[in-house]
Amino acid sequence: VKVEVSSNPIKDKSQALALYEKVKNVKEAVVSSFESELFSEHRPLPTDTDVMLQELTKILGISSAKIMSLAEDLYANGFISYPRTQTNMWIRMDHKYVLDMLSNTPLGKYVRTGVFQPKNGRKNDNAHPPIYPVKPYPYDDVKGKIWLYIARRYIANVASKDALLKRWRLDVRLGEVPMNTTGRYIVDEGFYDVFPFFKPKDVSQIPEVKPGEILPVLKVELVEKKTKPPSRLTESELLKLLEKNGIGTDATRHEYPSKIVDRGYANRKRKTFILTQLGERLIQLLENIDEQLVTPETRRFVEQIMYEVELGKRTVDEALNYALNIYSGLYEKLEAYIKSVKLVL
């Protein structure tokens, strides 16, 4: 097992060298403490559109626009339920029918008998249920992978148990220098058995030890690392940010990543987005005109007032006038700068 200095990361090189000198010849570590505890990893919630797109872009590595197109084709041919939904809770659902259908597919071995209550979320669009499999899909193509994801997630939600894991922490002393390490491992796979896509990979298990026990030291290293820059946004992360900031709806968000690429504001590199010079200039220019032109709040409030119309809290005319009062002012500011916009871009 690999342990590190408890005060890590050490940013001062001379301090790191001093500590290394203290421990480089130490041959035994003394256990200070060992702690462990069980915890549950909860089953996934019923599948809504946002979650489906966020997860499948990670799993399949294709665009959310392509995934939505294929999901709609699966729906049109009766293989899955309607794929545009914000609902992640079951209201009225014949789970026995779906589970009986899945029992006659290769996934049948995961359909366990017993009383398992589906785990519900809190979102209900009052229009469509969560996404679920309707009938078996017979082909091993990309649509088949989407269907399998939906079916596996359904079983994980409706007919599986939570996973059980154990986390642990080991504290030792090398001479007078305290060091520690942590880890976790799976005790009972639970739903990961049928839905393994995001199963923890960084697992490690060590025998339980007691304070005062002596452990042999195999090697002592002084490791120098550089701080890594933040990773670029993946499509899955972008979709999560759109949902979090209330930009677009479950029916439109999948279009946004492709649009920013098609319009030249960003490029795709593997699974991430890289801002282009055009995109960077556009943001800087709009920020200089009025910050509201680039902040999520400006778009979010429109989605919010439309939702208030749906709930009957505003009339259509009230919502329209409210939005026009804000957007007309922004439009006038932008129109005044339109010539400079053309020159800069």
Image (cartoon, helix red, strand yellow):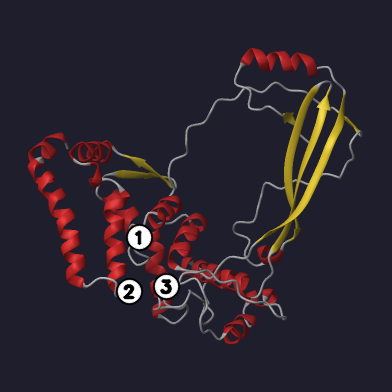
Q: Earlier in the sequence, mark 3 or mark 2?
A: 3
Q: Kindly identify the residue that appears in the image at 76 percent across and 29 percent down.
A: 179
Is the residue marked by circle 1 packed among few (<14), some (14-19), or many (20+) residues within 10 Å?
A: many
Residue picked out by circle 2: 311
Location of residue 60 with respect to 317 vertically, above or below: above
Residue flagged by tag 3: what amino acid is it? Answer: Pro
- Whether pointer 1 and pointer 3 mark residues with C-beta atoms closer than 8 Å, the reply is no
Q: Residue at x 27, y 71 (%)?
A: 309
Which residue sits furthest front?
313
Q: Nearer the viewer, mark 2 or mark 1?
A: 2
**On the image, numbered disc 1 is attached to which residue?**
253
Residue at the disc numbered 3 = 83
Which image quarter holds the C terminus?
top left
For marks 3 and 2, give the CA distance. 23 Å
Foreground residue, 40 or 64?
A: 40
Classify mark 1: helix, strand or loop: helix
